[in-house]
Amino acid sequence: MRTRNALIRAAASEFDTAGYDGTSLSRISGAAGMSIGAVTFHFPSKTELADAVQEEGRAVTEEALNSRSAENLPALRMVVDLTLELARLMDEEPAVRAAIRLSRERPGTGSWSDVWLPTVRELLDRAYETGQLRENALPADVTTLVEYLTSGAEAYMRSRIGTEAEFESAVAQLKRVWHLALAGVSADGSPCAAPLPAPRGTRDG
């Protein structure tokens, strides 16, 4: 088990950095300090090793999710806390970052968001029913906002990889963005009077 876990950790780091196509079993064996034979004894193919890394990333996420969900907090506050926890995992856990990247690069293997998105939807439904959201802040739309914020946190985190510049943590940045989202950015606290423009290439009506 120790050898298997060490291989998963090494593979997670490699998949996170180079992606599925850019990673080979020989590269993983070198990172783990083991022979190719030791790697293929546990994982005969790169596909099986990638599956194990994605499973580990999802398991780490689910464990953190369950820990947060056990707290007795208002539903909307729990949604915010969960997204901050997801940002922390992306910052600190190579297996989570690798699971996110692999799920994009290997369609059909299960999305990382499948682990946490149903919980977010359920909490937002509860928040709406208990009056924690504005009447026009529909749970489906707020769920989309959460997906955008989480994807943005990952994009921000990946922009820092391989650089030596000082960056604000993804968690700290996401806290500030959530503050804006919850408070609103309009000076009078109301939506803009003018309708939003239609995207290019679309027709009104």
Image (cartoon, rainbow, N blue to C red):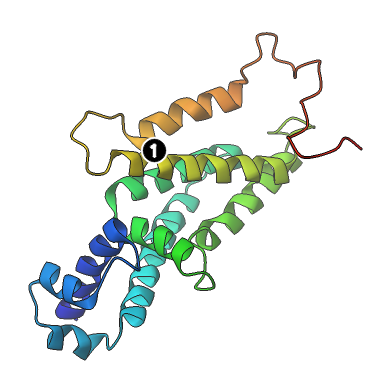
Q: Is residue 51 above or below residue 185?
A: below
x then y, percent, for residue 121: 64, 51
x then y, percent, for residue 42: 23, 87
- Tell me which residue sits at (31%, 34%) in the image: 169
**Rendering quarter of residue 23:** bottom left
- Tell me which residue sits at (48%, 40%) in the image: 152
- Tell me which residue sits at (20%, 67%) in the image: 10
Q: Toward the viewer: 54 or 171?
A: 54
Q: Is residue 94 above or below residue 6?
A: above
In this rendering, would 181 be left or right of 64?
A: right
Residue furthest to the top: 187
Quarter of the figure with the N terminus: bottom left
In this rendering, would 124 be left or right of 176?
A: right
**Rendering quarter of residue 48:** bottom left
Q: Is residue 6 visible?
A: no
Q: Secondary structure at mark 1?
A: helix
Q: Toward the viewer: 91 or 104?
A: 104
- Tell me which residue sits at (55%, 62%) in the image: 114
Find disc 1 in the rendering and name its residue. 156
**Rendering quarter of residue 137:** top right
